Amino acid sequence: MTTRKASKSPLCTSALAMIVATATLCPAQEPTESAAPSAAAADQQQTPGQQPGMPKNPRRPETFQEALNAAGDDGVIVFCYGPDWNQRSVRMLQSFWNKSELEKATGQAMLVAVPVYESPTEKQADEARRISDGMPAIPFNVCPTIMMVDKNGAMYANLPGMDFLGNENGAAALKNIANKLALHRKMLELLNKANSLQGEEKARVLGEIGELPIEKPDNLLDSLKNADPQDKTGLVRRNEYSALQFLYKQMDTKDGFLKSDFHTTLNDLMVEGMKVVNDTALRPEDRQAAYCLLIGQARREEGGSKRMKDMIKASREIDPNSFYGRTMQRLAQLWSGERANESPDERRARRTKGKDEEKARRQRDREVKKTERNTSVN
């Protein structure tokens, strides 16, 4: 998968998204020189919707706008490929996107392929704009990318690059697309159910939508607040809380460090952090993320070792099977001097030996200093 510098077209992403994509999503791509055809050949290259002699497929419109106009509940699935710079995506267009297996796996979703050029001719740029008109911006400017859009034009899933789409035969892509489409259908089912309910019952059904691993409806939080204005279910807080916003709140905007003094006290940070940790309405991973902030701060505090160990243990107990829960044991080994598969008696003996060695080292230091003072006097 290859990233390309964002242009001014509607397909471009923000600079931040480009940084994230480059840092986390991009394995090596074959050289651009071998991928890019000559300008004349690229100008003659046809998009799937332009190929002559093929009967028109009602599920494969030529432009995104046509696809959106014809979309039902299964929405639109968009395949973004780079004709003049990413030959992997071009090969995937033929080996996966144009196959009938895709139509079988995607229900009644509309399918549209959108070219994303690096150095388009004027004709190619006009054609790309015509095909992509009205399409949401690509979150990560990489090819190939598959975006899944509902019938209102809102993106609910994004599968960027080979990390999410697998190799060129498309087996992994088909599986992931089918999974996201099933989640989208589940969300629509829950929305219909919620429309027939009121109050806390409605809020609980809306809360199920908040747990689905796809993009949520823009009005989900407002709907929760209207259904449960007193937040008796805790679902408003659960869906309103942001771990990143909590972190930024604790940071000094001038230098990017935490507002709490690294070398004096944890009290201010502990007050805010423990509010999050003790709020059982929040997701376990959000509570554990707050613990991570406190643990990292305690490690820097003089005498904070015991407090750090206690917080590592407490964080792991919230959900030992989550990402944070699984990493806490390793964190204890790295930062607390604990070792895997070590019995309490072995740990006690190791620590006693360490204390004895430290005591002996300090005694040697005192004797050396005493000898140095006597030598200086003489």
Image (tube, rainbow, N blue to C red):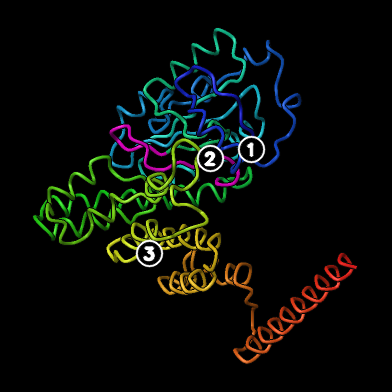
The CA span between labels 2 and 1 is 9 Å
In the rendered structure, are the residues bearing label 2 and label 1 in contact, judged by CB atoms less than 8 Å apart? yes
> Which circle's residue, 1 or 3, is located before the other in the chain?
1
Give the structural element (helix, strand or loop) at label 3. Answer: helix
- Residue 267 in magenta? no
Whether 237 is drawn above or below 67: the answer is below
Name the quadrant of the N terminus: top right
- Image x and y of residue 266, in percent: 43, 60
Q: What residue does disc 2 label?
A: 160
Residue 322 in the figure: left or right of residue 122: left
Point 59% across, 10% down: residue: 121
Give the structural element (helix, strand or loop) at label 2. Answer: strand
Q: Residue furthest top?
A: 122
Q: Residues within 10 Å of mark 3 (few under 14, many from 20)?
A: some
Q: Amino acid at mark 1?
A: Met
Nearest the eye: 319 or 209: 319
Whether 32 is drawn above or below 97: the answer is above
